[in-house]
Amino acid sequence: MQHLDDPLPSQQHRYEGLAVLSELELHRRRERLFLVFGGLFLGTLAMLNILGITRFIKLLEITDGAGDPVLVAGVPLVFAVAVGVLPYPITFLCTDFISELYGRRRANAVVWTGLLLNIWVVLILWLGGWLPGFETIDPATGRPELDEAGRLPVFYEVRALAFGAVTASMIAYLVAQLVDVHVFHFWKRLTNGRHLWLRNNGSTIVSQLVDTTAVILITHFYAKALPVNEDLAIWPQLWLFIATGYAFKLLAALVDTIPFMVGTRYLVRYLRLPPPEKSST
């Protein structure tokens, strides 16, 4: 299927029953849709970096007949994900749409813009903590004093967790998203532009494994923010976090196959692109 970054991007594929659009209207449609996907991608990225690892959600706990948790290598079998993970799968759906409709160059451009957005978030968080406020500063440490509950002011707690989340996500995100785009186009070439479901799922499944592993390891060893039990062996707990987080993302990847396939078939008509089944690339 011709992308919008291929030669002659204004060329229209003619669909029966659909009017031929003016060059101006065609350009507006394509740029508006790109803005929607790019905005959704970048907005989700900013949101998950702030929410990040501020809370872990227990999705499922496996128990035995007596109601006691089932243990694996001494670790309770609990499926948990960080709250920031909840909207994350939508970013891969957006890059898949952009890859399919606009081509690899624009998909990579959005990925690199997302990296700059991460840096911008870190800069604002750092600046917000560096500028003087109304907190009482401990002269010995230069840090705000703990409140009556023994906690840092809310901003500083969010800031510390966000720093950890952003550091983990910046590394994992860049690798995973670039892997997603690369694998997407690998499957597209291999299948001669057919089998939307294969490149959608094949790219996301591989990239999410890379992303999940990197995020969990960096979050624990750098940010020290995983809710681990210090009395139990650490690696079984980390593998469980990786497995449960990946299972959540894998399920999301399988679910988003339907909107991706349906959306693509509608949008190639809306943008007047050749249908995928007629692609030779």
Image (tube, rainbow, N blue to C red):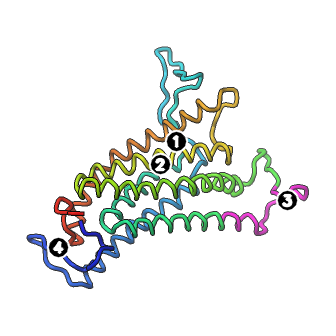
Q: CA distance from mark 2 to mark 4?
A: 38 Å
Q: CA distance from mark 2 to mark 1?
A: 8 Å
> Dot 3 surroundings within 10 Å: few (below 14), some, or many (20 or more)?
few
SS for tag 2? loop
Q: Earlier in the sequence, mark 2 or mark 3?
A: 2
Q: Which residue is mark 4?
A: 13
Give the residue furthest to the front: 190
Residue 197, given in percent of the width and then of the height, sits at 27, 50
> Dot 1 surroundings within 10 Å: few (below 14), some, or many (20 or more)?
many
Three-letter residue code for mark 1: Val
User: Bounds of the magenta span?
Assistant: 125-144
* Picture residue at 66% right of the left edge, 31% below the top: 229
Q: Is residue 35 left or right of residue 265?
A: right
Three-letter residue code for mark 3: Gly
Three-letter residue code for mark 4: His
Give the number of the disc on residue 86. 2
Dividing the picture into quadrants, the one containing residue 169 is: bottom right
> Dot 2 surroundings within 10 Å: few (below 14), some, or many (20 or more)?
some
- Contact flag, marks 2 and 1 (Cβ < 8 Å): yes
* Picture residue at 27% right of the left edge, 85% below the top: 24
Three-letter residue code for mark 2: Leu
Nearer the camera: disc 1 or disc 4: 4
Q: Which residue is mark 1?
A: 81
Q: Is residue 14 left or right of residue 26?
A: left
SS for tag 4? loop
